[in-house]
Amino acid sequence: MATLSLKHVQKIYPVREEGKEKKKKRKKGEEPVEKKPFNLKVTEEGVVAVDDFNLEVGDREFIVLVGPSGCGKSTTLRMIAGLEHITRGEFYIDDKLVNDVPSKDRDIAMVFQNYALYPHMTVRQNLEFPLELRKMPKDEMKKKVEEAAEILGITPYLDRKPKALSGGQRQRVAIGRAIVRDPKVLLMDEPLSNLDAKLRNQMRAEIIKLRKKLDATFIYVTHDQTEAMTLGDRIVIMKDGEVQQIGTPQEVFSHPVNIFVAGFIGMPHMNMFDGEVVKKGDGKYSVRVGAAEIALSEEKQERLAKNHVETQKAIIGCRPEHVSLDEKPGAMIEGVVDVSEMMGSSVHLHIDVDGKDCIIIVPTLDLDTGNLGSGAKVRFTFAPNAVHMFDPETEENLENLEFMQNQ
C-alpha cells in the first residue's frame, strides 16, 4: 500500500550540440537549421518534456496517464520508477522524499510494453528471477510464484518458454513477474498496445480483476482512451508535457476543461461548430449555431451566470450520442450525409455541415436508417444539457467548473 505525491515535477532533456562532422558539411555562409521538438518548450537548459506536473495519488488508487504520443506520460512514469532523473520538483512515496532513491529501493514494479521476458528462461524461472535477487528462501519463492500464476491463470504454462506463448499469455507472465514481489506501487507502460483488439478487451478485464486482488497502487500509461475510461479511478490527461485535466472518467467526459480534452476523450470525437453564446434580456442563456438556437439547461444557465458570461462568439461542442435527428418544424441545423457507417446496434452518420464533418450516432431501432444513405438531407439539434461552450481564443470551457481545476 502506498500514497504518491508529485509536486511541481519537471523533466528537461539537454539539447545535443551538432557534431563537428555535420558542421563541416554545411556550405560556406549557410546558417544551421534549428530543429525543435514538435510542440514542446525549448529553454536554455534544453527540451522541457514534462512541465510542472502535480498529482496526489491515494492508497490503492488506480491512476491512468493518457494523451497523444510525445505528451510526456511515459517520461512521467519513468521518473516515478526512478529510471529518469527528476530535473526539478519533489516526488514522495508515503511522505518520504525519494528523488534520489535508487529504483531498486523504491518498492516499485513495472510492466513494460514489450514484455521484457528472458527468452532462455521458462515462465517459472522468469517469475522466480526477482525473488532470487532478493535471496528469498526456495519454499517461499515457490509459494509466491504459484500464487501469482493462479491469480493470472498461467499455471499450465509454468514450464514453457516465452516463445511458446501467445501475446496475451506473455503479458500475463510480465504482470506476474511484477506482482510476485508484492510491490507498493505497480507501474504499467502501455502493456496492451501489442495485442489485437480482442486480446486487449480480455486483458483489460483481467487487469480490473487483478486490481481487486492486489494491495497496490496502480499508475497506468496509455494513449488509448478506452483503456483510460474503463480502468482508471481518475484520469490524468496530458498534452505537450503539461497536465490538461485530472478527474474521474465521468468528469472528464461530461465536463472537459478545454477543447483539447473535449476532442481527445470520447469516441467518436466531439462535434465542434462555430457559434455563439447568447445572453438575453432576462438573463437566460442559449447557444446559436447557424439558424438553430438551443436553450440551455438550468444547470448550465447557473454556471454561465456565475462566471458573468456575456453574449460572445464560441466554439459549440456536442458529442455524437447527444445529437438527435428531428424533422419537426423550427430552426434546426441542416446538413447532408456523406458517409453512413453501420455499426450493428447503431449507425454513425458523417454529416457535411457547411464544409465541416459532424458525426451523429443513430440507434438502428429508432428509425428507418435505410433512408439515411449518402446524399440524404438531414436536420438535427442538440440535447440542452449536453452542449459544451468554449472560448475561441483561450479554448477553455466557459462553464469553468471548479472540479475541472482539480489538479
Image (spheres, rainbow, N blue to C red):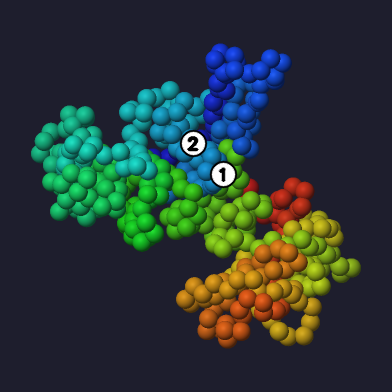
| Residue 203, percent from left and from top | 34, 56
Q: State which quarter of the image contains the C terminus.
A: top right
Q: Residue at x 80, y 62 (%)?
A: 276
Q: State which quarter of the image contains the N terminus.
A: top left
Task: Identify whether 369 is placed above or below 322.
Answer: below
Task: Identify whether 180 is placed above or below 285.
Answer: above
Residue type, mark 2 in image:
Thr
Labels 1 & 2 near each other (Cβ < 8 A): yes
- The kind of secondary structure element at disc 1 is strand
Side (left or right) of 114 relative to 228: left
Q: Residue at x 67, y 64 (%)?
A: 357
The answer to which of 348 and 30 lies nearer the viewer is 30
Among the two numbered marks 1 and 2 on one chain, the one whose residue lies closer to the N terminus: 2
Say which residue label 1 marks. Answer: 238
| Residue 249, percent from left and from top | 52, 57
Residue type, mark 1 in image:
Met
Side (left or right) of 126 relative to 67: left
Residue at the extreme left? 139
- The kind of secondary structure element at disc 2 is helix
Kindly identify which numbered label has been placed on residue 76: 2
Kindly identify which numbered label has been placed on residue 110: none
Side (left or right) of 64 relative to 168: right
Residue at the extreme right? 281
Q: Residue at x 64, y 51 (%)?
A: 260
Q: Quadrant of residue 200?
A: bottom left
